[in-house]
Amino acid sequence: MIEVRNVSKTYANGTKGLDQINLTIEKGEFVAIVGLSGAGKSTLLRSINRLHDISEGEILINGQSITKAKGKRLRMIRRDIGMIFQSFNLVKRSSVLRNVLSGRVGYHSTLRTILGKFPSQDVDLAFAALDRVNIVEKAYSRADELSGGQQQRVAIARVLAQEAKIILADEPVASLDPLTTKQVMDDLKRINMELDITTIVNLHFIDLAREYATRIIGLRAGEVVFDGPVSEATDERFAEIYGRPISKDELLEEVTL
Amino acid sequence: MTNSTKSWNQIVPKPKKSLYRWGIYIVLAVIYVWAFAGVPVNGIKETAGQVTRSILSGLFSPDWDYVYLPDGEDLLRGLLDTLAISILGTLISTVVCIPLAFWSAVNMSKSRWTSGSGKIMLSVIRTFPEIVMAILFIKAVGPGSFAGVLALGLHSVGMLGKLFAEEVENMDSGQTEALLACGASKLQILWFAVIPQVLPGFLSYTLYRFEINLRSATILGVIGAGGIGTPLIFALSSRNWDRVGIILLGIIVMITLIDMISGAIRKKLV
Amino acid sequence: MKPVNLSTNHSLKRPNPPSKMKHYLTVVIILLLLWGSAVQSDSTLRELIQGLPNMLDLLKEMFPPKWSYLDNIWDAMLETIRMAIIGTTIGAILAIPVALLCASNITKKSIIFYPVRFILNLIRTIPDLLLAAIFVAIFGLGPLPGIFALSVFSLGLIAKLAYEALEAIDSGPIEAMTASGANSLQIIAYAVIPQIQAHFMSFTLYTFEINVRAAAILGLVGAGGIGHYYEVTLGFLEYDKTCMIIIFTLAVVLLIDYASTKLREKLL
């Protein structure tokens, strides 16, 4: 369970990134965060695992405050939260397997991981994770030899190997073509259903959000302006979120056509 | 024709060269007059032509016997010594400059003062000529190759540290962010996300610096810091032109070969 | 590694890991090279540790620097700068035809540009101090051999940088000039030089920066400039004066670097 309590974020130049956000996300939910670029989607997501610090309020992960955590405690909380990025963020010159194993570093001592002595269960776990996203045959390829869609699947495998209980995905499909977009979103959805992993995804395309999510959160200028099930997220409500009618480039279907 | 030119000039006046530009020309002219006025022209010895001919004939009829002498100082041992000095010097500078590079990389330190102080230190080291460092090291460890190794090692830190720091600064921050999000510690981030990214660049710059160090190592002998420079200076001062010839040939062949090998490896790395 | 059944409940097909032989071999070769180098150059850590106190003594003697020595070395520093200016200029002028001959997009014939490049590479293998030592043997002591050494060195460096820049220029204007019936000199004047001159000036300034540093040590082999005073002061064990030379050189070099970098930024 993720609890976001009265969270605000003000940047050094005075602009408000987040403004009094209050949210509770239950285990196993598939949440899509939508809004214009600059609305604070990415800031909110990165506040949850504290890649960004917040100025006010508190965020609790399964009852533990990540806002107050430091050092090892912070790393232990982060270990349970996997993150997927728009630009994949794989270590391009390392092998796929090593990238997936790097999701395990939080479980072992620094010395052990640096010597490369991952236990064989970890290696098995990494292969199982790669198998789940159908990319096991690429295990020893260098990450930069893979296509964008394959790289994003490796990133998902990294999160699986991490045995994360929460997945944060920051525009996971923004760099992908429509076909691979569908594959990656299907993977995320399947993992969410099968392993009951809470999933929060920032999305640009609202039809994708409607298709995959169980709950949609709309942000505008750092404030939550919509929070409800997909059935309530009608075109009219979206027009409210965006402050204007939905344009064609916000619909994947339209872009594809 | 002249008529029409005139009219065009009236329509679109030719831009005048600005005063600023003329100022630069005048400053340049003054600098050059000053520079050339101070050079003694009568300093050429009348033997110059003869000596040049001797060196050239020495280059074309080198003292082949000097290449290998069963006992003692010969060309091959001198070149090997030079190579050894540059290899070790490069190793020392690489080891020393890695922490300095991370220290002076902007994205690795919290405050600009930290990285700024690192950069200033690197550029001070860079301006110290290796030959002057060698003079100082000779005073410390005595004349010989080791002084040369230490001099090259310390001097190269300046340039390598700067290049390494730039490599670290050009790193993709997303990859470190991903590791941070997994709950990795600082050392784990360094090992899993930073090192794989910067290693090829580091190796390539190290080889490049090695090529430069090899050239420097050939002259360290001039002041007694080992390598092929010592016999060369002896040969020059004793006017043994055939020997000068073979030593120059040896240096040229060695540097050309090493450049080719190192260049090939560097191409593969990137 | 044994195949293990996991939660997905089917045995995994795993690709074979690539051989690590190449990595091990590389590491072994590098270690051998280092070990051999240490033996060849008699480098031991013990010697360094034993020598460290000597170095500290030396550093102690260097401070405070003897500021009054500045009067004695002022002229030598000016000579150093003169040598650098003249050497760079001669080198830059000589580099123009050489660079044009090396560039494959201007000199179309490979029987010309390959040999010229080869000779250029040969010139570039000889370090500046070595050139100076040879020129001192030919011309005798003084700044003249230093100037010649710097000229040859600058020729090598500028010509290399310039021909690489030449090969990267836009071929369109050359085609246009060729199409309008220009001869090769006209093509160079109207299509090549305008594209390259800013780069060329920048390379020359860059070489000048290097030459100031080089000129400051050429005196060690008798080729003029401030380097001569290293030998003088070190010979008499006057380390406070040596320190003054080092500090003065450092200041001048940093100043010239700064000015030259600013100028280069303006050029490009």
Image (cartoon, coloured by chain):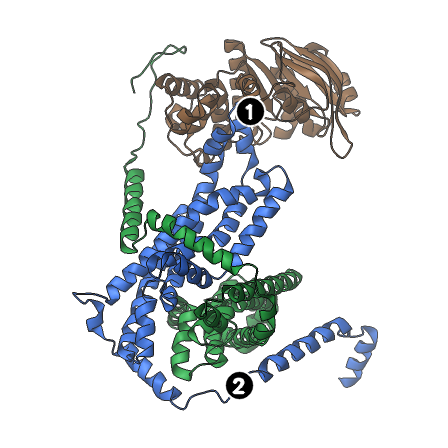
Chain colours: A brown, B blue, C green
The answer for which chain carries disc 1 is B
Q: Which residue is mark 2?
A: B40
Q: Amino acid at mark 1?
A: Ala
Q: Which mark is residue B181?
A: 1
x and y percent of residue A1 in the render? 62, 9
Q: Is residue C95 left or right of residue A53?
A: left
Position of residue B102 relative to residue A86, above or below, is: below
Viewer-nearest residue: C235 or C150 = C235
**Circle count:** 2
Q: Earlier in the sequence, mark 1 or mark 2?
A: 2
x and y percent of residue C164 in the render? 49, 63
Q: Place residue A102 in its image quadrant.
A: top left
Rate crowding at label 1 as few (under 14), some (14 to 19) or many (20 or more) other CA atoms within 10 Å.
many
Q: Is residue A25 left or right of residue A180?
A: right
Position of residue B121 relative to residue C113, above or below, is: above
Viewer-nearest residue: A45 or B2 = A45
